[in-house]
Amino acid sequence: MPKNTVDRAATDKKSAIENDANLTREEKDAAKAKVDAEAKKAKDAIDAATSNADVTAKQNEGTKAINDVPQTPTAKTDAKNAVDQAATDKKAAIENDSALTREEKDAAKAKVDAEAKKAKDAIDAATSNADVTAKQNEGTKAINDVPQTPTAKTDAKNAVDQAATDKKSAIENDANLTREEKDAAKAKVDEEAKKAKDAIDAATSNADVTAKQNEGTKAINDVPQTPTAKTDAKNAVDQAATDKKAAIENDPALTREEKDAAKAKVDAEAKKAKDAIDAATSNADVTAKQNEGTQAINAVPQTPTAKTDAKNAVDQAATDKKSAIENDPALTREEKDAAKAKVDAEAKKAKDAIDAATSNADVTAQKDAGKNAINAVPQTPTAKTDAKNAVDQAANDKKSAIENDPAFNS
């Protein structure tokens, strides 16, 4: 029967619709309602037909119209397209994220693809428009929530920051550096850290990031902790000490012992100055301690006490001797002057020997020898003695002549 044929076509079509996994409940119900409408329309046309040919024609038109009822999964298709668009947008954002390395971008985009597939599978399994919408929303949220976390670059920059912190701590605790040197070195560390982090930001792969991190931490650790101010100041003190000790060594007025004592004093002042420089905290303090130290070094006295005392003793001996000569009534003016000249000669000879002496013992020996020589200058009244001897001889001769004169014996 023609209408039975139409009903069978409708039943078959609705069965196909019901079993179409791509359609939601609402789409199935709508499609089946359209089938029923086409079936009713066909059967009404068959009822109105007046000939077998018309009946057959209306039956064929009706079954075709029933089979042509579309099974178009609009809800799921639209939902999956929305998921695909969200994935495309998210992957574009990831690709354009300069904070991510190539590996991080690829991993994040793979996660986006996984979330998109999961969402579309859930949409395919949904049975109602509401379920489809829910799965679409869940999927797009999961896609948008895929993290764009620049772990490699963040970790690398953190490592650079830690290296900078450690280096600056070492600089700050370096007692050899002045405040100005510490500040300059730490500024250089900050400069190297910034340079390294900029290079890390510009890196495009994990390998590049690691390379820039390593280069940066090396550059940071290589920032020199060179105590220029203190080193220069201590070198200046050492030079002043060297010059002063050379002057002491070459001072002929000093004995060996005096030279050694003076040079020991120089060494003590140099050590005191360098200790003060080490304890200084600023360039100004360093300069002040350097100047104080070099002044103290240069002020170490080169006082020839031994030779001065010895020559003074010789001069005193000469003075005493010349006074004794001058007060000797047995001597004539000429004898006094000659004796005092001899004293002066011995005094000069002694003082020259003292000047040439190299040790305290030599000085003492030359002093004693000089005093002995001075005191040994003879005070011999030759003129008066000879004159008196001549008078005595004349008297003796005269008295002998008188004694032998016969005129006095008669």
Image (cartoon, grey):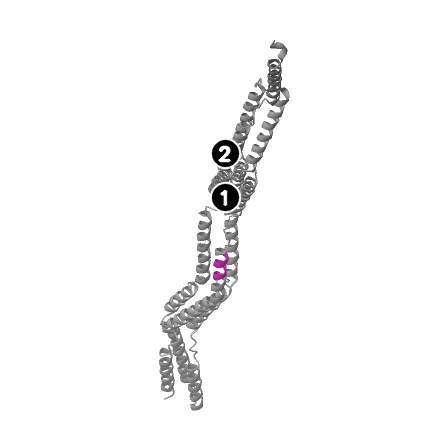
Q: Is 304 a magenta residue? A: no
Q: Magenta region's main secondary structure?
A: helix
Residue under circle 1? 179
Q: What residue lies at 40% left-to-right and 65% top-to-bottom? A: 142
Residue 312 visible from this viewpoint: no
Q: Position of residue 214 (x, y in %)?
A: 47, 61
Marks 1 and 2, the one that precedes in the sequence = 1
At mark 1, the secondary structure is helix
Residue under circle 2? 364
Q: Position of residue 321 (x, y in %)?
A: 55, 24
Going by the numbered disc 2, the residue's amino acid type is Thr
Give the left or right position of residue 407, taking residue 73 as reference.
right
**Residue 239: quadrant of the picture:** top right
Residue occupying the far front of the picture = 410
Q: Position of residue 8 (x, y in %)?
A: 36, 85
Q: What residue lies at 56% left-to-right and 33% top-to-bottom? A: 350
Tell which tag, 1 or 2, sits nearer the viewer: 2
